[in-house]
Image: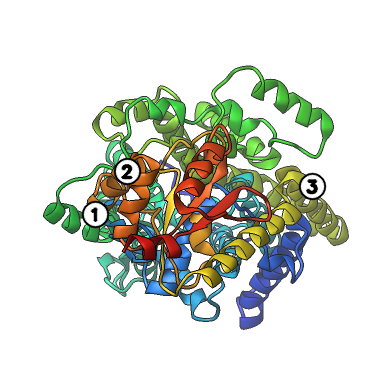
Amino acid sequence: MSKEKLIKKPSGEGKPSILNTVLPYVVSAVLTFVFLLAVFKLDLNKILIPFQYSGDYLFTSSAVKGIIENGWYFNNPFLGTPTGQIMFDYPNSDVLNIILIKIITLFTHNWVLVINIYFLLTFFFTAFTSLYVFKKLGITTPVSIAGSLLYAFIPYHVMRGVGQLFLSAYFMIPLAVLVLLWLFEDIPPFYKKNKKGKIAFSLFEKRGLISTVTCLFISCSGVYYSFFVIFLMFIVSMILLVRKKKLKNIAVTICLIALIGLGVIANLSPSIYYQKNKGPNPITVRNAISSEIYGLKIIQMLLPIDTHRISKLNKFKEVYSESGFIINENRCASLGLYSSLGFIVLIFALLGGFGGLLLQNLSRLNASCLVLALVGGFSSIIAFIFPQIRAYNRISIIIAFFSLLAFLMFIDKAFVFLREKSLNKLAYSALLLILIFGIYDQTSREFIPNYEFNQKEYESDRSFVFNIEKSVPTGSKIFQLPYMYFPEHPGIVKLCDYQLFRGYLHSKNLFWSYGAIKGREGDLLLKRMSSLPVDVLLKEIAKKGFNGVYINRLGYEDSGAGLEKEIINVLGAQPLVSLNKNMVFFNMLDYNKKLK
């Protein structure tokens, strides 16, 4: 194998200084801020409006509000009443994201602001980590800055958005890729040449420390990113075994795999301990077919984003979307023009064997991702053993980094060539145009949150819950209808999953029935009571200490008219109606007194 250095010093760059080290990150941060204002049409008022107000966003919001009120997310007594919401049955390994959110809550208790701030910060974090890695891999600073912006605003990021907040926090991926590439080097992390010129183990070697921290943070950044990085490290170890047979590299790789695995287990340990004592409760049942439904498709990576700014490209994408293919979250896999070009380069580099060590290693890792994640790939085999990992399309964010890096390597050569010819103005102008068009291509007007609608719905809910709180004593229990189990309910009529969280999100001192983990005692109790005749139901919930009934009309074919009529006949009182007419609330205080 060629002895060419895998990682080279950027061409034409002088000795590092504090200014040269810090200035690129300042420039990247300023440009990130400018593009955030442009892409999301942000201003100070809009930062207080939910960027989204439905679906998974409401689940995330309830968790963030729970952290604010209770310190952490495992127990929330304000939900799932009378037993409370106990989240140990919903295992996750997102402790890094939760800690960062917890830090933000030290400065504000506004859950909308907390989520918006963290989402916007993920763009800065991603820009910084990718800039660091691009520079480390030999890309000149100006091109690295442009690349950091392109990766921060990759379609995956904006399309996942606040609805899938923790998936949007992929800022550790660039560092994970750097570690993967270090493992290919003649001297792997934790090793360096001593004074005698021999390669010796060093526990505090710089790359080893960076690799350790990166792997620990990856293990706390969600099970999907942990799984994908472990898979790629396994591939690296196989390549080293077959082609180089370097035991040091293989040993380091295995140790880092173990470190990520142990980190994930540590994240999941509270759930493991809880289920060991309370018994198993598989609330998120998966099956093998899901890996095919949510698998990766090359065409979706290469096609333009939905609602592309260029009308002809948009129509071209619509033809595919309307052709009957399975379209779900896999639409987020779109790479954008530049990463698509880099992706094609990596495919040809693999087949043709051209390019240096860096390009060749990227092409091998890229191909490994495809072999795993494509529909019908090895993911389908793994799914029969471990179906909990199902959305393999999410590996596209790693492929996007490989592909963008390949694209930047060629752009960098052109940029250096122009500078060597003293065509600096042309070089920088061309690079700026590439950056602007890249952001233009990777984003869409449809990515702008519907601020007006979200604020209208938000204000309607806030006003409604405020009036409920005025009408009942502090600490009252509110029974919610229709019954929906939690989590992952398919929805009822027009009522979407997690929409019943809206009441809790706007309350300060009320306890809500929705949110008990399905399959446990609290959920089974709520399910049983919800199936009772109205007169019996009202007596039952009165005995349980509930002071009111909250109904979302969207969950009924007749918009709840029949149910409301029955409740009025029993209570002898008219309901409180929300501004948008979707929710009603029946005060049970007088009824409870009579019942006693």
Q: Residue at x 50, y 37 (%)?
A: 363
x and y, in percent, of residue 402 in the image: 54, 44
Nearer mark to the viewer, of 1 and 2: 2
Name the secondary structure under disc 3.
helix
Q: Are marks 1 and 3 in contact (CB under 8 Å)?
A: no
Displayed quadrant of residue 70:
bottom left
Question: Which amino acid, by three-letter code, is at mark 1?
Answer: Ala
**Residue of label 1:** 258
Which label was assigned to residue 437?
3
Give the mark nearer the N terminus: 1 vs 2: 1
**Residue of label 2:** 527
In the picture shown, does residue 205 fall above or below 215? below
**Residue 255 seen from this side:** no
Q: Nearer the viewer, residue 257 or 281?
A: 281
Name the secondary structure under disc 2.
helix
Question: Which amino acid, by three-letter code, is at mark 3?
Answer: Phe
In the picture shown, does residue 362 fall above or below 59? above
Q: Nearer the viewer, residue 94 or 28?
A: 94
